[in-house]
Image (cartoon, rainbow, N blue to C red):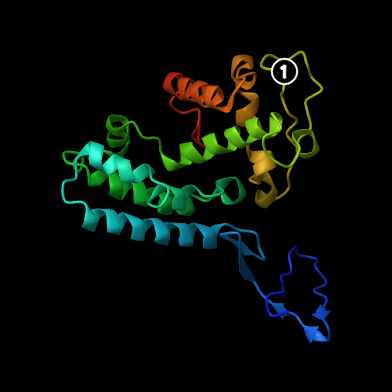
Amino acid sequence: MDKCKVMYIGRNNPEYKYSMNSHVLQEVKQEKDLGIMITSDLKSFSQVTEAYKKANRALGMINRSIQYKSKSVLLCPHHKTADLRPHLEYCTQIWSPHHSRDKQLLEKVQHRFTRMVPGMKVLPYKERLRQLSLWTLEERRNRADLIEMFKMLRGKSCPNFDSSFERSKNLSTRGHSVKLTKHHCTTDLRNYFFSERVIDRWNMLTEDCVSSCTINKFKGKLTKIRNNNMSFFMDHR
């Protein structure tokens, strides 16, 4: 019973008291579930802070343990599962931040990483990314959203695509055949939730892209889109 807790979500929640076998369950404002920090206000700041701290520790370990910091050597641990990037990208479809302060906090880790590469320290951040063939973390989060959408469309991920999204009934517009309807949202919390924030960018994809036969081909076409339009995966297009 000690593992069972109560979290009240929503402004009009009556906050009833819950018990189990006469044991009143503990009330919490924040709890970790499957590695994600869930808070009663459903905001992402706690998860962003934890991801930043973990990634910063991993980056410090890389900095201390690698003496010869060449481009090829540094980029290897940057992609390893046990090191840096997974801390910053784990389940971002759930907690992807929309506040500038949170985005900048996460991006600081990659700022610091790219400055470790010899000859990169004096260059602007965007130029360092270009020379290292890296995307900003914001771009990667938006890319991850689209990949998750594609998996749902192909039945490779739950929940079912059509139970989560409403297909557009306007078939006369230009674009692909799987366009979705964007709903009017009265709160930022809803507007920036995965099932809403991803729609505009998804609707901008081409028929050739959404009709990809495999996930890897879909990823490849997303890369081509970025090469042709550097701002496509940025939030302030």
Side (left or right) of 113 relative to 2: left
Q: Position of residue 218 (x, y in %)?
A: 56, 24
Residue in the picture at 16% in, 51% down: 67
Quadrant of res 174 = top right
Residue in the picture at 71% in, 24% down: 179
Q: In which quarter of the image is the N terminus?
A: bottom right
Q: Is residue 183 above or below residue 204?
A: below
In this orientation, does residue 136 appear? yes
Q: Where is residue 112 in the image (x, y as percent from the top left)?
A: 29, 50
Q: Is residue 11 above or below residue 65?
A: below
Out of 105 and 34, give the one closest to the viewer.
34
Q: Which secondary structure lies at badge 1? A: loop
Residue in the picture at 52% in, 27% down: 219
* Amino acid identity at mark 1: Ser
In this orientation, does residue 123 appear? no
Q: Is residue 27 above or below residue 233?
A: below
Out of 191 and 36, give the one closest to the viewer.
36
